[in-house]
Image (spheres, grey):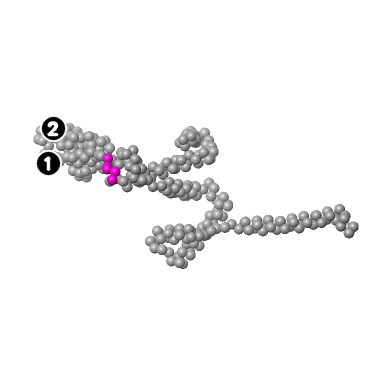
């Protein structure tokens, strides 16, 4: 009983109690630490559906059970290797990895931007505000006579003299036989500005669309030489009715929404990150800053 009243005995009991508590807590922390060190990789229904759909799109058939097991095993190996690579820092300063991640984020942004669908009034408002986007281009039909500078002493004089004769004779069609050979056909029907430009050059195309129908004109310079031209029909461009271009209106509406969402998203990203560029970079591309409205 006397021993129980000794302060030293009380000190020993307290010390023993602390030792036991510390040992128990330390074992618990170690156990929890070991449990948390086991990293979890989940392979669920979503992953199974993804590998199956990817295989089906590529091979135009569903995978067999054995093939599906192989696909899941490869997916698991890929995930394990990817995680180990990230732990080793192999994803840092890697152009391919950076571009792939940026591409995945771009897909995510595009998918998010397409959640909402416009109603009829939204599409009509968009159509009214962007009618030029739905304008049918003008089309022209014409006959031309080619004069090759490489085969004539003075192609311009020959073309001019032929034009005078055409005016006097009323423009017989057989005049096309007086020109030089050209791989492009002598009669062009229902061609738009882009088509004429692709065949003869931009300046020639612009002048053709300014000519009055029915009369011979020229000589007009093309990428090949000189031409006398008679426009037979000119169909002016006009805005297509809404009903005819509703599908295109919807596509362009979606594209506008995607761009707007992407601009807002990047504006927030520019606010989130502090971008530092050295003087040489800014001298090339300008200041990398973001205004309050989100524009750079």
Residue 256 rendering spot, x and y as whole percentages: 39, 42
The residue drawn where x is 23% and y is 41% is 139
Neighbourhood count class around disc 2 (C-alpha, 10 Å): few under 14, some 14–19, many 20 upward:
few
The residue drawn where x is 9% and y is 35% is 169
Residue 250 rendering spot, x and y as whole percentages: 35, 46
Q: Quick one: SS at disc 1?
A: helix
**Relative to 101, 168 lies left or right:** left
Neighbourhood count class around disc 1 (C-alpha, 10 Å): few under 14, some 14–19, many 20 upward:
few
Give the labeled residue for mark 1: 174
Give the labeled residue for mark 2: 164
- Earlier along the polypeptide chain: callout 1 or callout 2? 2
Q: Residue furthest front?
A: 1
Q: Quick one: SS at disc 2?
A: helix
Magenta segment: 239-243
Res 232 → quadrant: top left
Quarter occupied by the N terminus: bottom right
Q: Could you say which disc has been placed on residue 245 in the image?
A: none
Res 136 → quadrant: top left
Q: Is residue 281 above or below residue 68?
A: above
Res 34 → quadrant: bottom right
The residue drawn where x is 85% and y is 56% is 9
Residue 182 rendering spot, x and y as whole percentages: 21, 43
**Relative to 18, 196 lies left or right:** left
Towards the viewer: 191 or 269: 269
**Relative to 80, 155 lies left or right:** left
The residue drawn where x is 12% and y is 41% is 174
Q: In this rendering, does residue 200 appear at all?
A: no
270 magenta-colored: no
Residue 289 rendering spot, x and y as whole percentages: 49, 35
């Amino acid at each position: 009983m006397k021993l129980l009243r000794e302060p030293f005995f009380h000190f020993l009991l307290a010390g023993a109690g602390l030792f036991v508590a510390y040992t128990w807590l330390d074992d618990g922390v170690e156990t929890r630490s070991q449990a948390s060190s086991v990293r979890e990789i989940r392979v669920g229904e979503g992953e199974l559906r993804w590998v199956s759909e990817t295989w089906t799109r590529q091979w135009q058939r569903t995978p067999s059970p054995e093939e599906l097991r192989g696909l899941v095993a490869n997916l698991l190996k890929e995930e394990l290797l990817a995680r180990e690579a990230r732990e080793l820092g192999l994803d840092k300063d890697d152009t391919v990895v950076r571009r792939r991640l940026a591409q995945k984020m771009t897909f995510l942004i595009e998918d998010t931007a397409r959640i909402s669908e416009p109603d009829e009034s939204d599409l009509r408002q968009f159509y009214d505000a962007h009618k030029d986007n739905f304008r049918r281009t003008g089309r022209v039909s014409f006959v031309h006579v080619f004069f090759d500078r490489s085969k004539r002493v003075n192609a311009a004089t020959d073309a001019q003299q032929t034009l005078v004769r055409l005016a006097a004779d009323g423009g017989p069609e057989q005049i096309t036989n007086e020109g030089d050979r050209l791989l492009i056909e002598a009669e062009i029907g229902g061609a738009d500005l882009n088509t004429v430009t692709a065949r003869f050059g931009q300046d020639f195309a612009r002048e053709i669309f300014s000519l009055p129908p029915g009369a011979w004109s020229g000589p007009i310079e093309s990428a090949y030489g000189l031409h006398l031209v008679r426009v037979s029909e000119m169909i002016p461009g006009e805005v297509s009715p809404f009903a005819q271009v509703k599908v295109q209106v919807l596509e362009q509406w979606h594209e506008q929404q995607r761009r707007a969402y992407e601009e807002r998203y990047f504006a927030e990203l520019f606010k989130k990150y502090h971008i530092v560029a050295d003087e040489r970079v800014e001298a090339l591309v300008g200041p990398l800053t973001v205004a309050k409205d989100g524009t750079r």
